[in-house]
Amino acid sequence: MSETQSVRYEVVDKIGVITIDNPPVNALGPGVREGIIEALERGNGDAGVEAFVLIGSGRNFIAGADVRQFGKTRPVGTRVSAAAIDDSAKPVVAAIHGYALGGGLEHALACHYRIATPGARLGLPEVTLGIIPGGGGTQRLTRLVGPRVALDLIASGRQMSADEARRLGIVDEIVPDGDLRGAAVRYAKGVAARRPLPRVRDRTDHVLEARGDADLAEALAASLGAKARKLQAPRAALEAVRAAVSSDFDEGVQIEQQLFEKLENADEAKALRYAFFAEREAGKIPGAPESFKPPPVKSAAVIGAGTMGGGIAICFADVGIPVKVLDATAEGLERGMQRIRETYAVRVKRKSLTQAQMDERLALIHPVDSYDAIGDCDAVIEAVFERIDLKKDVFNRLEAVMKPGALLLTNSSAIDINVMAGETSRPQDVAGAHFFAPANVMKLCEIVRGDQSSIETIVRAVKMGRDLGKISVVAGTCDGFAANRSRAPLVTEAMLMLEEGALPEQIDKVMVDFGYPMGPFAVSDLSGLDVSYDTRKRRAAADPNFRKLHVPDRMVELGRKGQKTRAGWYRYEEGDRTPHPDEAVKRIIAEVARELGTPQRSFTDEEILKRLLFASVNEACKILEDGKAYRGSDIDVMWLHGFGFPRHRGGLMFWADGVGAREVHRQVAEWHERYGRRWTPSRLLAEIAGRDGQLRDARAQA
Ligand code: 3HC
């Protein structure tokens, strides 16, 4: 392939049409920028060409720089090809459909006119990759829409619709779907003779106005949320936008470039790039036949109208898929429907949804009162109480009514998928679809393979999750599956450190400083301390070696169940969710420690962090050893989307690689000596440590 095969150039009715053809998303990969520059040179030197159209072939305009090229030497920067567009003596019209993101939007901003189809999505998502736009985007956008709007878009990385872009003046005209190229050529002909060219870089109205705005500096700084302020890229975005206001265009571009280069190879950007690709890798199912194209789920049913069931139903309705909801009792069904209505009403109140959208979505959720009513659905998700007898009963009934080939899914969070599959004559169609609470908010959908689930079932379930806007990650069936099983040791260690002298607020602070939105104790208060109490009691009864967690047990026995009782690891004021450290908790912990005779000591922040996370890294390796996850990076995706692990740290395994597998193993082995069985080092961890390998690259062993 020649360097410029990814860019086509042809002259249509005196308009030079430059088409980016670099599947799958027209990223600005090798050859694309050069191709654009060459085409502009040809057309500018051709007296038969009056203007240009820049357009993407396939699904979209341009999805941005090629993220795989970051950290490598780039022969021609986005800056240079965008500047070539800007410098063109003949007008260039960007014709946008699908995505115009990052460097893609920067190229469009360098064009002299922009038209878009109604479904186009535009944005500068660079901060989500730990960088800022590096092709003049911070400077041009600020000139085009003013610093406040520009910073909002750049620092959030959010996408906007064509309609919003039109309102902001980023897009000049919206043209109907169908023949974008034809419309763009016509548009180009209409503006071909107009001079001077409306170059965004020459716009001064917004920056001059901003220079006279005494409140601007403070307002811009304040507009970065607390979370964004902790990260380098949004802070750099602020600096770049400020530079756009205070400097001339060329100086501003230089400042942007310097900021970009500083960020590109920083740890934050490396972690965020890794997370981007890990998420995409998680969707790939080893052994899936390439020829199998999973049919989409077009209709669904949810069994159980509790909090989870209702949340799952909302997920379907939110993406326009009709969903039937069935419950064991009419009252349960009505309560569930009421909760669904309330959830939507809150969204309307918060203005994230209009009343009309709420009505449309509610119209897709159909309460039904019999199994016969759901038989023709493409997929059914069982979300009844976590009791084996109930689940078995549901699958027995599903066996009787569901059409052949329907996906039979269970939202169980712990019960072996094989138990449910065993109730049907079609275990190949059964799998887990484990949503995380609240189901309509959390992005993780853990797809759980039973021993007999067919690969096609897994591929279909993964696609269903993705179609719901979730990140589907596959796990094998075992206690806790992969996500919760890998997190459980973190919680155990947090609880056991209390016996040794740590306090909930100290541990939570370490995790929040690390980047979690909440520490494990605040989370426990939110979900309720009693949730795991019964499970622990059952396990203790069944396994004489089970390490009892005396402190949380005592808390529950004293009625401290978390936010719902206004007392848990923290105390809460009436109607307020702010956690306040509580002397009573200190006393309970001290009392338990005295009874156990555990010597008291103090912990450094580093020890707390390592103790919690290494315990989980060790377990994650055991999960891979047992073949219950495909890849180390899949564990990371689960932690990012199921447990609020800070994205700028990549994920559990990526973070541990930063420490080094050898060091993790050494410490795990030492704690094994000190604390015994639960710290038994994973064989896989030892093996990876022995060859100084990467945990994130580990693969399922069994
Ligand atoms: N670079 C390299 N590969 C990319 C890419 C990019 N910018 N965007 C997508 N891809 C790849 C994906 O890795 C995936 O590859 P795979 O099939 O081998 O796994 C393939 O394209 C399809 O991507 P998705 O599965 O994500 O497809 P979707 O249709 O779900 O989403 C998308 C499409 C919204 C464009 C999404 O891929 C996306 O958000 N891409 C990243 C966009 C982005 O961040 N752009 C800014 C880049 S930084 C930049 O431009 C810097 C500049 O300022 C200098």
Image: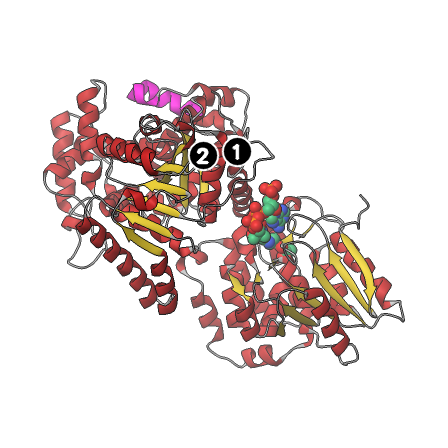
Q: Does the residue labelled 1 lie within 8 Å of ligand 1?
A: no
> In the picture provided, is 600 more to the left or to the right than 35?
left
Horizontal and vertical percent for residue 400? Answer: 32, 34
User: Considering only vertical position in the picture, is 598 above or below 528?
Assistant: above
Which residue lies at the image location 54% right of the left edge and 75% below the top edge?
Answer: 167
- Amino acid type shown at disc 1: Ile
Coordinates of residue 222 in the picture (x, y in percent): 43, 67
x, y (%) of residue 3? Answer: 80, 47
Mark 2 surroundings: few (<14), some (14-19) or many (≥20) residues within 10 A: many
Is residue 666 covered in magenta?
yes
Which quarter of the figure has residue 35? Answer: bottom right
Q: Is residue 608 above or below residue 8?
A: above
Residue 285, which numbered label?
1
Check disc 1: other Cα within 10 Å, few if <14, some if 14-19, many if 20+: some
- Whether residue 41 sits left or right of residue 477 in the image: it is right
Question: What residue span does the magenta drawing correspond to?
Answer: 665-679
Question: Which residue has dot 2 on it?
Answer: 474
- Asked if the residues shown at circle 2 and circle 1 are in contact, with their CB atoms under 8 angstroms apart, the answer is yes
Secondary structure found at label 1? loop
Q: Tell which of 343 and 38 is nearer to you.
A: 343
56 magenta-colored:
no
